[in-house]
Amino acid sequence: MSKSATKIAGIVSIIAGIVFIVAGAVTWGLITSNLAEQNITVADDSEMLPGDDVNGPFSAFAEAQIINRHAMDSTGGKTYAELGGEVGAAEAAGDTALAEELQGQRTTVMNASFLRASLFTSVVSFGVAALVMGLGVLWILVGWALTSLRTAPVAPVVSQDRAPVTV
């Protein structure tokens, strides 16, 4: 690769790195502001970050975990699928009151699952934004290395029957 092509590749890499960092930072900011607008606070009985505003990856993860624990506590540890089987059995037995109670628990678990999925989507989005910013730094370093390359000095080639020739 010629020196000018290497320099151009380096400059393009630096520009790409800057774009990556800006895009990652904007994405991080958008996720943070959208989460903050929801006015969610990590439950006080959470093992992680109790009482913290949900506006970052760790607080979103903590709230998702405590939502699951609350949902499981409200159903005695039964999952959505398990409750579905119990609803069906209660209906088959003609116990509509029990079927309605179990269906209410099932709805609670379903809503908890939706909330957790939304929070986990935020956590993943924060991770992708951080990855993009990290790649931006890497591209800047690669670009800097490419633009810093110097032409290596050329050693003279000595022929036995001629005078030294510089290539």
Image: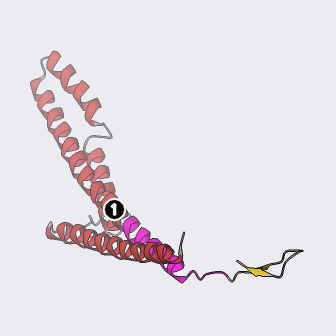
Viewer-closest of 139 and 108: 139
Quadrant assignment, res 118: bottom left
Which residue is drawn at the image coordinates 15% and 29% (left, top)?
98
- Tell me the kind of residue under disc 1: Ala
Which residue in the structure is indicated by mark 1?
62
Viewer-closest of 89 and 163: 163
Quadrant assignment, res 149: bottom right
How is the model colour-coded?
A: secondary structure
Tell me if residue 32 comes above or below residue 74 in the rendering: below
Q: Which residues are magenta?
A: 130-152
For the C terminus, give its image quadrant. Answer: bottom right
Q: Position of residue 131 (x, y in %)?
A: 40, 65
Q: Position of residue 78 (x, y in %)?
A: 30, 37
Q: Does the magenta portion include 120?
A: no
For the N terminus, give its image quadrant. Answer: bottom right
> How many C-alpha atoms fall within 10 Å of the one at disc 1: few (<14), some, or many (≥20)?
many
